[in-house]
Image (tube, rainbow, N blue to C red):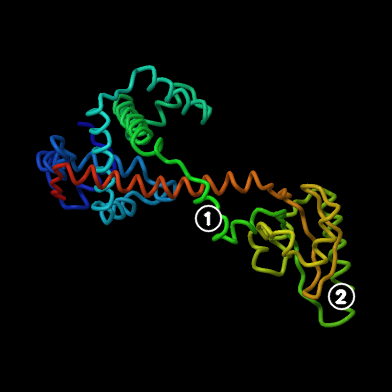
Amino acid sequence: MRYTKAMLIILILFGVMGHSQAAVLLDKVVAVVNQEVVTWSELYRSMEADASPQLKELKEEERLKIFKSNEAAYLETLINARLQVQEAKNMSMSVSDDEIKEAIESIKKKYSMSDEEFKASLKKEGFAYEDYKKRLQDQILISKIVNQQVRGKVIPVEADVNSYIAENKDFKSSSGEGYRVSQIFFKKPKGPEERKALDEKAEQLIRRLKEGETFTDLAKKYSEEPMGSTGGDLGLIMKDQLMKEFAEALSGMKQGEVSRPFWTERGLHIIRLDEKIAEKDQNQIREEAQKEVGNRIFTDKYNKWIKSLREKAFIDIRL
């Protein structure tokens, strides 16, 4: 068995001494699922593989302590996966070498990786190539059985879609026309002299933008609002929620353009139109509502299906 650096470190953290003792812990059975076992090393390899980018950036000792605190919850996920693979095999489903090859080629294409780069990436993650192919095979099997037993039976009816649209006013209102906007903002001055100074400062910023400085950098440096620290991003604003002055400034702007400075009762604004969101027609609204209803039905059916697999299985957790 290949020991990754992470596995060896956790042995030390848990106070395991000596090679023979290490091998015992690495081979420890943490669960039995029908006739198959799940080992401690398999559990930790899976947690390492599925860790988020943020978690992977932590120091190894810190990451492994988090893994330790989440052992039980992740083991349940691993048991559910094992049950689904077993169910697929019970129904004579299989995965061909061509299917695995096609999946690998798709991954390499998505991330623009050569064969050597792909294998180097697997090695960095602690995976032997054959181990990864086995993991991929299980994922494809799970996808097949879930599509057959659950997803293929999800058919949202018109009445459910109508009810969802009627009951979710936020869903309907978010379907209108909107804008993604960033701004540089100066608070309302106390007097005419300060107002004149702000007008001049705003004109200087407009000149600097024309000379090639970025809107984001200037917002971070000069904008007098909390959003300034992140480049002035105001997020998505629906058209019917815009202040009159904003609506007037945006009306003739194209994506990427920066407005002339303008005043509101709050202060002085320079805005950039990052994206214009077109209003969705009724067909688009219904399609998105149907998708949301379908997702809810799928989640409910999937959870019930997993529960039924667990109820008829022999599961012995030894963690």
Q: Looking at this view, is 108 or 79 the one in front?
A: 79
* Residue type marked 2: Arg
In the image, what residue occupies the spot 49% across and 22% down?
114
Q: On the rendered structure, is 109 left or right of 246?
A: left
Please tell me whether mark 2 or mark 1 is closer to you in this view: 1
Res. 92 image quadrant: top left
In the image, what residue occupies the spot 25% across and 27% down?
91
Q: On the rendered structure, is 65 left or right of 171?
A: left
Report the quarter where the N terminus lies.
Answer: top left
In the image, what residue occupies the spot 87% across and 68% down?
199
| Residue occupying the far front of the picture | 159
Q: Secondary structure at mark 2?
A: helix
Q: Looking at this view, is 223 or 105 the one in front?
A: 105
Q: Position of residue 261 (x, y in %)?
A: 85, 63
Q: Could you tell me how many numbered marks the image carries?
A: 2
Q: Position of residue 37 (x, y in %)?
A: 15, 38
Crowdedness of circle 1 by 10 Å Cα count: few (<14), some, many (20+)? Answer: some
Q: Position of residue 42 (x, y in %)?
A: 23, 39
Measure the C-alpha gap from mark 2 to mark 1.
Answer: 50 Å
* Residue type marked 1: Tyr
Res. 258 image quadrant: bottom right
- Asked if the residues shown at circle 2 and circle 1 are in contact, with their CB atoms under 8 angstroms apart, the answer is no
Q: On the rendered structure, is 296 left or right of 129?
A: right
**Residue at image mark 2:** 195
Q: Position of residue 98 (x, y in %)?
A: 38, 17
Q: Looking at this view, is 156 or 301 the one in front?
A: 156
Q: Which mark is residue 155?
A: none
Res. 178 image quadrant: bottom right
Q: Secondary structure at mark 1?
A: helix
234 above or below 212?
below
Q: Looking at this view, is 222 or 109 the one in front?
A: 109
**Residue at image mark 1:** 164
